[in-house]
Structures are given as structure tokens and as C-alpha cells.
Amino acid sequence: MDKFTLHTGLVAPIDRENVDTDAIIPKQFLKSIKRTGFGPNLFDEWRYLDHGEPGQDPSSRKPNPDFVLNQPRFAGASVLIARQNFGCGSSREHAPWALQQYGFRAILAPSFADIFFNNCFKNGLLPIVLPEGAIARLFDEVAAFPGYQLTIDLPRQVVVKPDGAELPFDIEPFRKECLIGGLDEIGLTLQHADKIRAYEAQRIAAKPWLNHRIV
């Protein structure tokens, strides 16, 4: 998992409440058994005018020119701002995969659905909860200033605006530590690899029959 410390990125707005995970990554793309390749199908039903299926060449699709991520001014955006209850609906982990693989590193919203919120941290995507008024002002500023960027300073737990104003945010210390260290659950476990190997060697030495396999 990529480390997250300090990130500055172009901001894109999704000006809708209750964006559910089926809108983030539609159900037909969940057939894949891989954890890669979901970025081109992020917000697929809003982003394209034709129906998408797994394996299609994105260059053959019909993009919706009115959708925000298809507008040239938001090309390369890596910070997303959204309205309340972002990520509601089913618990599919593919939703943060798609957002991250598109290029987003952080999402700012007044509130998130619980399961989506937890899945973001497990995949190196930082969900930041800010007051509704602060989010509303960010929407206004993004609309008014093309090229609008934010800097997210995770160690200091602040979002820094272009004028230098800072918006503080809360994050659980353990989740913060994992993001800064680039550690998912597997990475956390592997930190204790030597102890695990030592325990397994001791266990087999004491009870060698446990190592037998039935063929």
C-alpha cells in the first residue's frame, strides 16, 4: 500500500448527495477476480453514454461530456470533494479500488457510509470528514477557480487551501499510523514475520505430527 504523508492535488467535485457504491463502480464490473483495472470504470454509468461491460476498450466508449470527470479542467484530479453520505449502498471493496486506481488519493465530504469509510483506509485512500459548511465553500471555490488545488498534510491533520487557510480534521491514531507507514492488514502482519516463523518452528519441533499432510 502506498504511503500517505503530504499530498497536493487538483480537486474535482461530485455535487450529489448519497452517492452509492453501485454508482461508484457498477455491479457488472464486480465479476473480475483481480484487484486491478477498475479505474476506467469509475462512475461508469455517469461517465459514459453507452452501457459498459468488463473488458471493453475505454477508447471505444462514448464519454458523457457533461460529467465532471470528463471536463478538461478536472483532468488528472487526485482529490475528490463530495456531499453527505458518500459511499452508501452495498459493501463492495471495489469502490475504493476504483477511486484509487483512477488516481484519487483523498475524498472530502461531510459524512461517509461506515463500510465504505473503513474500506478506504484498508486500501490507502484517505476519507476526510469536514463540516458541511466547509465542504460547501470548497465547492464554491472549485467552481470559481480553475486549477483549484488542496494540500493534505496527514501528519498535521490539516487540509491547506490555496490561500494558506487550514481546515483541521480528525483521524484515529492507528489509521493515521497505517497510512503514513503504507501498511494494510497484511503489511501489519508481516511486521511480525520473524516472530511468526519462530513460533511455527517451535510448534513443529514440539508437535512434529502437526506437519504431516494427508495425500
Image: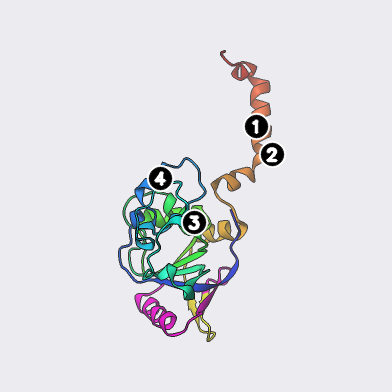
Label 1 amino acid?
Tyr
Circle 2 is placed at which residue position? 194
Q: CA distance from mark 1 to mark 3?
A: 30 Å
Residue at (57, 44) in percent of width and height: 186
Q: CA distance from mark 1 to mark 2?
A: 9 Å
Residue at (34, 53) in percent of width and height: 51
Circle 3 is placed at which residue position? 121
**Residue occupying the far top of the picture:** 215
Quarter of the picture containing the C terminus is top right
> How many neighbours does mark 4 have within 10 angstroms: few (below 14), some (14-19), or many (20 or more)?
some
Residue 146 lies, in percent from the top left, at 48, 81
- What residue range appears in magenta? 129-158
Label 2 amino acid?
Asp
Q: As drawn, is 179 to the left or to the right of 20?
A: right
**Disc ID at residue 135:** none
Of the two numbered discs 1 and 2 on the same chain, state the one appearing first in sequence.
Answer: 2
Question: In this orientation, which residue lies closer to the viewer: 188 or 141?
Answer: 141
Circle 4 is placed at which residue position? 30
Question: In this orientation, which residue lies closer to the viewer: 163 or 33?
Answer: 33
Viewer-side label of 4, 3: 4
Residue 119 lies, in percent from the top left, at 44, 53
Q: CA distance from mark 4 to mark 3?
A: 20 Å
* Label 2 secondary element: helix
Residue 154 lies, in percent from the top left, at 56, 68
Q: CA distance from mark 4 to mark 2?
A: 36 Å
Q: 121 above or below 72?
A: above
**Disc ID at residue 199:** 1
